[in-house]
Image (cartoon, rainbow, N blue to C red):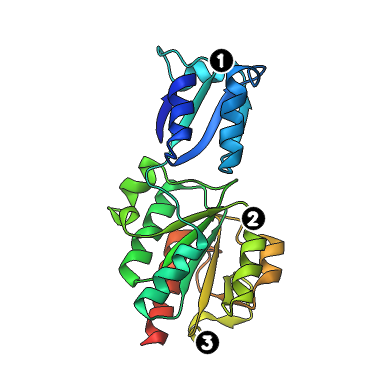
């Protein structure tokens, strides 16, 4: 679980101070008066605001007064996509970024962060919605890698892909029905590697944005690999090709 910040003043001050927040949860019917400022502050920082029944908030923070609002604090501050590109420039390397499309298992995200760190990739991009955020469970599963891997959290993956393509970055998606085996594909140069969520893969629109789709060879009866395992195989194929 993420750390929960409960109460109007604590949540408001956390937002004012720029503390990394995954989302704000409010009781229905309380988004006026003192809580309207919290909504405004959250929207200014593109932080999702979710409206729920008050009973749900009671369960989130049992025994503690929440005054109709709680916030989930992130395990680490997010960066901008440009910060990831700057990391590559500072190293004098072609950008190598991993984008995750709706990864919902915190252990998978943590394992992917660990792989990205070990392989020397420059950062990870995750969507703001329908995806696990940087929670304490993710941090633990990453074995400390969350402290070293820049993670950007964006509102629109499609728009982000288009911006990166305009900067000369080649976009490669992992797809079970991709026309090329991953080790036969050219995975050198500036690269964005897109990994889909557990069981569903990359979304249709994102798939269409990819310059190339690659697959992992599957000889067994199970149709796909765990997302973090697939990411590790693909990331290290990029490392191998880069020499």
Q: Earlier in the sequence, mark 3 or mark 2?
A: 2
Find numbered disc 3 in the image and state the secondary structure of the residue it sits on. Answer: loop
Badge 1 crowding class, 10 Å Cα cut-off, few under 14, some 14 to 19, many 20 or more, is few
Q: Which residue is mark 2?
A: 156
Q: Give the label, 1 or 2, closer to the camera.
A: 2
> Gap between marks 1 and 2, in whole Å?
32 Å
Q: Position of residue 167 (x, y in %)?
A: 59, 76
Q: Nearer the viewer, residue 5 or 233?
A: 5
| Quadrant in which the N terminus appears | top left
Q: Earlier in the sequence, mark 1 or mark 3?
A: 1
Q: Position of residue 123 (x, y in %)?
A: 43, 64
Q: Is residue 4 visible?
A: yes
Asked if marks 3 and 2 touch (Cβ < 8 Å), the reply is no
Q: Nearer the viewer, residue 48 or 228?
A: 48
> Gap between marks 3 and 2, in whole Å?
27 Å
Q: Position of residue 66 (x, y in %)?
A: 47, 16
Q: Give the label, 3 or 2, closer to the camera.
A: 2
């Amino acid at each position: 679980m993420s750390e929960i910040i409960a109460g109007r003043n604590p949540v408001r001050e956390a937002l004012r101070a720029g503390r990394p927040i995954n989302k704000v949860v409010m009781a229905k019917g309380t988004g006026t008066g003192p809580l309207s400022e919290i909504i405004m502050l959250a929207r200014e920082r593109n932080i999702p605001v979710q409206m729920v029944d008050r009973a749900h908030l009671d369960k989130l923070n049992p025994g503690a007064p929440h005054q109709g609002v709680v916030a989930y604090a992130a395990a680490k501050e997010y960066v901008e996509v440009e910060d990831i590109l700057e990391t590559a420039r500072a190293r004098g390397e072609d950008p190598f970024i991993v984008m995750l499309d709706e990864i919902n298992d915190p252990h998978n995200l943590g394992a992917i962060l660990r792989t990205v760190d070990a392989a020397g990739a420059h950062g990870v991009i995750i969507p703001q919605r329908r995806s696990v955020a940087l929670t304490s469970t993710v941090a633990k599963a990453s074995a400390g890698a969350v402290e070293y891997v820049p993670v950007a959290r964006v509102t629109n993956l499609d728009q982000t892909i288009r911006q990166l393509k305009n900067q000369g970055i080649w976009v490669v998606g992992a797809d079970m029905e991709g026309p090329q085996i991953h080790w036969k594909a050219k995975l050198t140069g500036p690269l964005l590697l897109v990994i889909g969520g557990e069981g569903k893969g990359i979304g249709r629109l994102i798939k269409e944005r990819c310059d190339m789709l690659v697959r992992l060879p599957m000889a067994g009866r199970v149709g796909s690999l765990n997302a973090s395992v697939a990411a590790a195989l693909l990331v290290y194929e990029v490392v191998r090709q880069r020499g």
